Image (cartoon, rainbow, N blue to C red):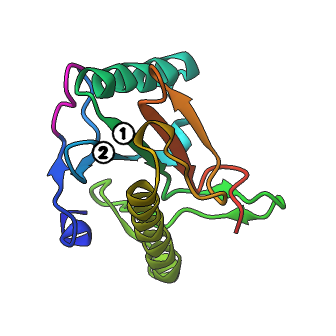
Amino acid sequence: MKKNFSDFPCEFNKKYGTSDHTPDVTIPVDNNLEILLDHDENQHKRYIYAEERSRERDLGEAALNKNKVSVMLRWNCDGYRTSSGMKVPSCFQRSKVDGSYSIHPDRKDDYENRMAELYKVIRQIIETYKKGDLKNLHLPDDYPSTQAGLNGHLHVIKLFYDGHIN
């Protein structure tokens, strides 16, 4: 994943502020905005919902303590259903030999499209931020978000989750 983000100044698997949580990637845009990227395998369906929301609140409080606005992109590379109900399979396959994961050869284009979409969203967030009021960051309409934490200090966007618009 590191090579995919070489055009952004990134920190990988680093504890975020006062929170005990470590986003997979933190992109410090400037002194006021950070983008947090979490790779949510299988949409984190196996995780307890309340714990996921608690994690988001903790990250929002950490952003508030840092006096920053953060946007958390929760990115799923596994299977999901589109808003029209079409099933989209995972981009990955698991090795029967050692259990490791790799991009499925038949899904390489889908993986690359998802990465392109992720970059597009990151760039849209940065451009939107540069144009707008920091405390009322407006995100692209294509990506409905939720606010967690305090005073809108953390916005959460889910990509390639069930209901994703293709």
Comparing 60 with 40, the one in front is: 60
Residue 30 visible in the shown view? yes
Residue 40 visible in the shown view? no
| Crowd tier of the residue under label 2, counting other residues whose Cα lies within 10 Å: few below 14, some 14–19, many 20 or above | many
- Rendering quarter of residue 57: top left
Asked which secondary structure carries label 2, the reply is: strand
Relative to 10, does residue 59 appear above or below in the rendering? Answer: above
Relative to 72, does residue 94 appear above or below in the rendering? Answer: below
Which numbered marker is on residue 21? none
* Residue 15 horizontal/vertical position (percent): 17, 31
Q: Amino acid at mark 1?
A: Ser
Please name the residue shown 25% across and 54% down the image. 29
Please name the residue shown 84% across and 61% down the image. 84
Please name the residue shown 40% across and 69% down the image. 119
Mark 1 or mark 2, earlier in chain: 2
* Residue that label 1 marks: 70
* Residue that label 2 marks: 33
Stretch in magenta: 14-19
| Crowd tier of the residue under label 1, counting other residues whose Cα lies within 10 Å: few below 14, some 14–19, many 20 or above | many
Q: Amino acid at mark 2?
A: Leu
Q: CA distance from mark 1 to mark 2?
A: 6 Å
- Rendering quarter of residue 5: bottom left
* Residue 80 horizontal/vertical position (percent): 65, 55
- Say if mark 1 contacts mark 2, CB within 8 Å: yes
Q: Residue 84 colored magenta? A: no
51 displayed left or right of 49: left
Q: Quadrant of the N terminus?
A: bottom left
107 displayed left or right of 164: left
Asked which secondary structure carries label 1, the reply is: strand
